[in-house]
Amino acid sequence: MATALMGIRTEGDSPGRRTVAALRLMEAERSEEILPTLLDEIAALGFARALVVNVDMETSELVPTVSVNCSKAFQQRFRASLYAMENPFVQVLHAMKPQVVNGSRKTGPPVFCYPMAFRSRSSCWEADRSGQSECLALTIDSSGKRLQLQEQVCGVCDMHGYGALVAVELPRGHSRTQIATLTGLIEMANRTLSRLFKAEHYFNRMSEMEVTITQMQTVMESMADPVILTDTQHRVIMQNKAAERFFKLAENVSEGRVRAVELNNMLFSAALSSMVVSGTDSSRDLTLVDSFEGEEVLFEAVSAPSYTRDGRRTGMVTVMRDVTDLRGAEEELRLNYERLRAAEEVVRQDRDRLNLIIENVGDPIVVCDKDAKVVLLDPLAQELFGSDKDAKRSPVRLRNQARLDAYITSFTYSFSDRESAPLRLVHPSTKAEIEFDAHSGKIYDERAQVAYTVTVLRDLTAVRRVEQLKMERRILEMEKFAAAGRLAGTIAHEVNNPLEAIKNCIFLLQNQVRTEAQPVYSILKAETERVARIVRQMLGLYRNTEQLSHVDVNSVVEDTLMLFSRQLDRAGIRVDKHLGELPHSVGSADQLRQVLSNLVVNAKDSMGGRGTLFVRTRMHTNGVSERIHILVGDTGCGIPKEMLKSMFEPFVTTKGERGTGLGLWIVKGIIENHGGRLRVRSKVGKGTVFKIQLPVVR
Amino acid sequence: MPKSGNILVVDDEPSVLVTYRLILEQQGYNVTAALSAAEAREVLSTKKIELLLCDLSLEKQESGFDVIEFGRKLSPKLLSVLLTGYATQDAAEWAEKRGIPILFKPIDIKQLLETIEYLLRNRHEIGQAIGD
């Protein structure tokens, strides 16, 4: 630079003056100082007027900015548009070559014009490092052609250049030396200006960067999640407050906290290492200890490597997300899902089981909704009612459906939870009428409203058949019994007359038997009496049953007890009698008396002395039929289990010689002839209860 | 102690008839036996009978009822006891209506004798109703 300056020698110029100018320019710290200093120096060289016209890059206007001894009018001469190509100053700027614009009478003396633009022999710092060639310094240097001032922008560092025209009024008859001096001075000023401009540009960029960094830091700090910048050795370069909580050791902290932080750092460093190994961008779950709270916190650490512009790796940026709650929630969610699955499984199994039951009940099942509309029919029910979807349902099925609907509708809107009613339907294929027993129940929803009704239809055909069979068997038994009774009666009757004669003979012989024959006679007499008893019993059963009338059961009971009162009293038996109010029964009072007598005598005999005879009568109504119940119980020896079955058969007795074995047989016969039933319950050592059920005829 | 009283026994079974007669005679009664209703009527018409002991079932057509009715027509004060093997409600009612004791076969001899003795002893007080 000094060399260039040395080459400039002007008239009336001294080397001292040039050195001063160079030093003044070099001393400038700011670019703004350069142009005034330049004009100062030009003036000091003896030039009358000088000014700098700046090119406004945005408006493309030439605007005078600094001047020395210039009138407004003089300055006005330089105002122009960069596109005003006829303007000589503009031409100079476009040519980028210093030139003397000759004066005229109108314009005055000639003016030396020197175009200034950013010049630098070295490319910018960024271009230098990245090796890019779009740097302004390089583009200016390499182009010999005319420059578009508006394009003076660095393609690498974005520095905007400048353009200006230094105009110096030349004295008349100016010398070449003067021009050379000016050129040297202006070039020197331009170099300095370019240098300062470059430095200022970097300064500005630094300030901008600082702002950016501050902003970035603010962003980092404002993040609730820990953010950590690490270098390639995983050393922490920068971290936010949230991260410091885990990784930074504050002063005067407890031993525990120190250990926690150290452990956290180790864990973090290990996680980073493994992430670097595993890939460029990855995440890890990391459990750290909060050094303040001492709690374990589960983090998801997401790390990304950071690079320089030229692709050099500088470290890692790690953002950690507290997922303790999230993982907890996830776990909770998973557990809930598991539970749901289990519940669903239970429900599914229940449903399968239910389906299996429904399929195997063997009775038609109908499920209806709250509006009594059928929602489910099992195959058997479908057979009876057909399907709604079947357009050509047979009339039989439609009729069945109508009967079912009527029943279910009335049940659905009734107040009862369950109901059963007979339902007569016709079998679609056999056309036979089937009697069903419809059992229905309601299923309620959570608002206690009817949600569904379930109806099971029980085919009563089989039940009815069994009932009929039972009835037939009973009638048969009774007929058999009656036939046996008649036969017994006939035999007894035929035996009766000869027996009468024998008995009379024995009586006649009573005082004529020799002493030694007396035992034989006794046997004869006793056995004959026994035969007489049997015959009497048999005839008693046979005694006509056609003679029926209204019987007051209670009075028959009273009569019988009265008849036996002395006997019972003597045997030490207490009578516990409770007779309820009864309607009349139809039957034979005599026969009922015989029944009661038999039972009372049996009870007395079973107690052997001391005991209680219970006698109860009461009405029993089960809604369908009314019956009179007569209970005769004792506290006697009871009847062994094996005897209970055979005790009503003829000639079964426990009384040996004293009994005929016909008593209970006759009792049963009489009760059954009355359309009643006889039941017995007994426990050995406790006692026996006979229960007679007689129908009520109103 | 011999007992006084003319008794007519009617039964179609000879062995029964004979034994009744023997028993009653043994007790000291004056006994006439009849095997049929016709025979009985004959006796009732000819002899003075105080007590008639009659079996209910005799031959096909006639019954003890007829014999008793016949006897009571002849002598309103005639005492009777009805004997029967068939204890029918009809018989019981018939006898009850007339105040006639009815004994069911096989007859307890003791009871028979007691009944006869009772009737004869109280014959003046006993008014057996005359049937229609």
Image (cartoon, coloured by chain):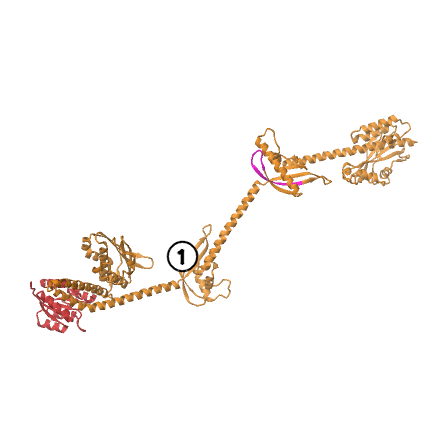
Q: Is residue A569 visible?
A: yes
Tell me where residue A302 sits by quadrant.
Answer: top right
Q: Is residue B115 visible?
A: no
Q: Is residue A111 left or right of residue A159?
A: right
- In the depicted view, which residue is nearer to us: A305 or A655? A655
Instruction: For mark 1, give the secondary structure.
Output: strand
What type is the residue that disc 1 sits on?
A: Glu
In the picture, the quarter occupied by the C terminus of chain A is bottom left
Which residue is outermost to the top? A16
Which residue is outermost to the front? A516
- Per the image, the residue denoted by label 1 is A419
Percent position (x, y) of residue A245? 60, 34
Q: Which chain is red?
A: B
Percent position (x, y) of residue A545? 24, 65
- Neighbor class of circle 1 (other Cα within 10 Å; few <14, some 14-19, many 20+) is some
The answer to whether residue A209 is above or below residue B106 is above
Q: Main secondary structure of the magenta part?
A: strand
Q: Please check the rendered image and state whether residue A302 is part of the magenta-colored stretch, yes or no.
A: yes
The answer to whether residue A93 is above or below residue A468 is above
Q: Please check the rendered image and state whether residue B103 is part of the magenta-colored stretch, yes or no.
A: no
Q: Which chain is orange?
A: A
The stretch of residues the image draws in magenta is: A288-304
Percent position (x, y) of residue A256? 57, 32
Tell me where residue A312 sits by quadrant.
Answer: top right
Q: Is residue A239 left or right of residue B76?
A: right
The answer to whether residue A423 is above or below residue A149 is below
Mark 1 belongs to chain: A
